Amino acid sequence: MKQPGCVHIISKHRAFKIDRKKISAIASEICRRLGVAHYEVCLQFVSPQVMQELNKQYREKDKSTDVLSFPQYTWKKPLKFQKDPPEPRPIINPLPLGDVVISAVDAADNVNNSQEKLSREICFLLVHGILHLVGHDHMKLAEKKRMFAEQTKLMRLFSGKKSKPPMWQGCIVPASKSQPLKKNTVKLNTVKSQEQRSTRGMR
């Protein structure tokens, strides 16, 4: 019997080691807080080259980006953060919510290759990507404000407390200390505040 909030993780980028347990726990909690714990999410970590191919194929943009989302449903209204969601129940066949594809190298570029900040950035991209799967977007001002408000609530949830470290801590590390984090392409422009930026490349 499969557990609710079933998360599949595929890592095709050897430059980084993914803590699958932590990534799965974060994604599952995002789904629970958004009321879709009975859905299945596929998370893929890919190289900038693969991401560039996907971005070109699906968005006609011939460059890599940090995250892409591929939702399976069209929602009447975007789902909102639940402060006290019910505990999920085990289910046999979870419904497919969609795919979130992340380029860790681009994520590292977003935070100027700071290893300390990279894990938080990956958590942010998971939050942002899954919000797209449940109907959020940021094409219009009203949509952007609504989506960023939900992002802030979820990121606060994972930020930890004085006696507890952030949930994202150590969720990703370079596979080798000598491994360069930068990709071999021109760095894309980013803005400083994660919660107030519109992540590039989202569908």
Image (cartoon, rainbow, N blue to C red):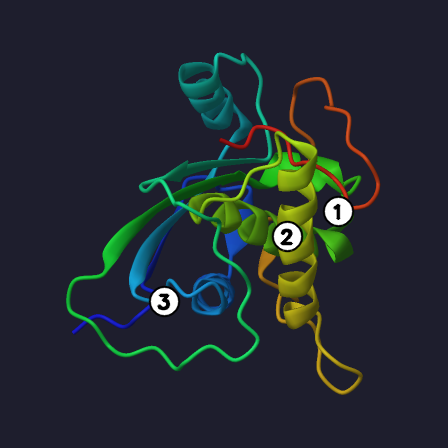
Q: Position of residue 197 (x, y in %)?
A: 74, 39
Considering the numbered disc 2 on the image, is that residue within a helix, a strand or a loop?
helix
Q: Toward which corner of the image does residue 157 lie, by quadrant? A: bottom right
- Which amino acid type is shown beneath numbered disc 3? Ala
**In terms of depth relative to the viewer, which is nearer, 194 or 170?**
194
- Picture quarter with the N terminus: bottom left
Considering the numbered disc 3 on the image, is that residue within a helix, a strand or a loop?
loop
- Which amino acid type is shown beneath numbered disc 1? Gln
On screen, 27 above or below 72? below
Asked if the residue under mark 3 is in contact with the one under mark 1, i.e. CB atoms within 8 Å, the reply is no
Q: Does the image show residue 180?
A: no
Residue depicted at x 36% and y 67%? 37
Mark drawn on residue 124 = 2
On screen, 195 above or below 50? below
Asked if the residue under mark 2 is in contact with the one under mark 1, i.e. CB atoms within 8 Å, the reply is yes
Q: CA distance from mark 1 to mark 3?
A: 25 Å
Give the mark nearest the N terminus, 3 or 2: 3
Give the mark nearest the N terminus, 1 or 2: 2
Q: Does the image show residue 129?
A: yes
Residue depicted at x 40% and y 16%? 57
Q: Is residue 133 left or right of residue 17?
A: left
Q: Is residue 185 left or right of residue 28?
A: right
Q: Circle 3 is placed at which residue position?
A: 37
Foreground label between 1 and 3: 3
Foreground label between 3 and 2: 3
**In terms of depth relative to the viewer, which is nearer, 175 or 160?**
160
Give the mark nearest the N terminus, 1 or 3: 3
Mark drawn on residue 44 = none
Q: CA distance from mark 3 to mark 2?
A: 19 Å
Q: Residue furthest right?
A: 192
Considering the numbered disc 1 on the image, is that residue within a helix, a strand or a loop?
loop
Q: Circle 1 is placed at which residue position?
A: 194
